[in-house]
């Protein structure tokens, strides 16, 4: 029984740390050859971030607020890392950044 609990805890810790995404977003973005690939990846993260932010907003004040907030923070961090890595690969900000509400007015990615 003790061993089972340790295994379950290990799975939970691992799954919450990565949230289903690569822990090193730069390593995911670096080999992408086209801006279209990068934008697809970025907009996928953006959609996830917006969805989790909405879940968090609904959960505020409830028991699920902490879990929702943690999930949102992880994806938001991945989104920021991806945006930074993509922006560093190009001379100017890719147009797809404007399609992501979280990045639309972010001066850090100009």
Image (spheres, rainbow, N blue to C red):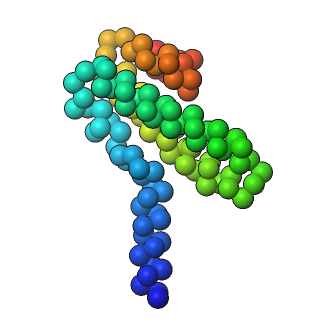
Please provide percent x and percent y for residue 93.
Answer: 40, 14
The relative height of residue 109 versus residue 80 in the rendered view (above or below) is: above
Please provide percent x and percent y for residue 85.
Answer: 35, 28
- Please say whether residue 106 is visible from this viewpoint: no
| Left or right for 76, reference 90 | right
Please provide percent x and percent y for residue 12.
Answer: 47, 65
Name the residue: 77% across, 51% down: 61
Nearest to the observer: residue 71 or residue 27: 71
| Left or right for 105, reference 28 | right
Nearest to the observer: residue 73 or residue 51: 51
Residue 25, located in which quarter of the rendered image? top left
Q: Residue furthest bottom?
A: 1
Please provide percent x and percent y for residue 31.
Answer: 22, 32
- Please say whether residue 45 is visible from this viewpoint: yes
Name the residue: 71% across, 43% down: 58
The relative height of residue 21 versus residue 66 in the rendered view (above or below) is: above
Name the residue: 66% across, 44% down: 56
């Amino acid at each position: 029984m003790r061993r089972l609990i340790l295994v379950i805890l290990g799975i939970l810790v691992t799954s919450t740390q990565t949230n289903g995404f690569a822990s090193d977003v730069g390593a995911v973005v670096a080999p992408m050859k086209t801006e279209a690939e990068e934008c697809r990846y970025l907009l996928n993260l953006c959609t996830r971030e917006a969805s989790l932010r909405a879940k968090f907003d609904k959960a505020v004040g409830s028991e699920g607020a902490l879990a929702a907030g943690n999930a949102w923070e992880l994806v938001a961090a991945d989104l920021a890392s991806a945006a930074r890595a993509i922006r560093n690969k190009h001379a100017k900000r890719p147009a797809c950044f404007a399609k992501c509400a979280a990045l639309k007015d972010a001066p850090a990615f100009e």
